[in-house]
Image (cartoon, rainbow, N blue to C red):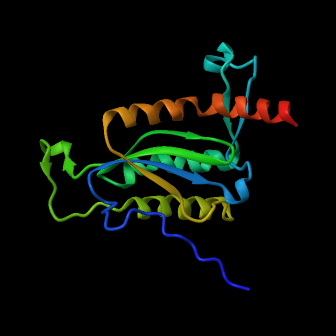
Amino acid sequence: MEGHTRKYIRLKNYDYSSNGMYFITICAKNRNHYFSEITEDPQCVGEAALGLPNVRLTEIGKIVNNNIIMINDIYKYVSVEKYVIMPDHIHMILFISDYDTEIGGRPRAASPTKSVNQIINGLKTISTKQIGFSVWQRSFHDHIIRNEREFLEICNYIDNNPINWVNDIYNQNFWR
């Protein structure tokens, strides 16, 4: 019996700590619904009151959410531009900049930014410690955002992910 060889999914010879935007998807182990519930609660206010799905974080989801927010504070040249925490996965856009906007947009000195891999592994590690067990699938998926059109499409995708989740659930139930 031969062992399974994992395929390297990162772009070869690409510096994942370089200036740019990255669309990241992180999945839960075995696609378990650890992070949130998608509901259409008529008692809710805001988007849910308009008939749009509501993302209700679980206790684990709240821990992960707090750690995603902390990325902006921990990593000086990294920001989470947009994200959504779905029941079994997370989508986010990471922006890595090699310019310090606090000092007039000049290139930074010899203080390297963490790579996307280090940032995501840090998020997983601290969340795992706080949760008490690992909820994460190995690795994560990334896409380098190449232009404004892609950025806007991905933002739209993230915004509509809860709606698509509900539609997928309804379609799955319909076809069974």
Residue occupying image coordinates x 51% and y 55%: 141
| 138 vs 64, nearest the viewer | 138
| 68 vs 98, nearest the viewer | 98
Q: Percent x, y for residue 20?
A: 30, 48
Left or right, 45 with respect to 158, comes to right
Left or right, 37 with respect to 149, comes to right
Q: Kindly indicate the quadrant of the structure image that contains residue 103.
A: top left
Furthest-right residue in view?
176
71 relative to 169, above or below: below
| 34 vs 130, nearest the viewer | 34
Q: Percent x, y for residue 116?
A: 40, 58
Furthest-top residue in view?
50
| 118 vs 10, nearest the viewer | 10
Assign the C terminus to one quadrant of the image.
top right
Number of numbered callouts drawn:
0
Assign the N terminus to one quadrant of the image.
bottom right
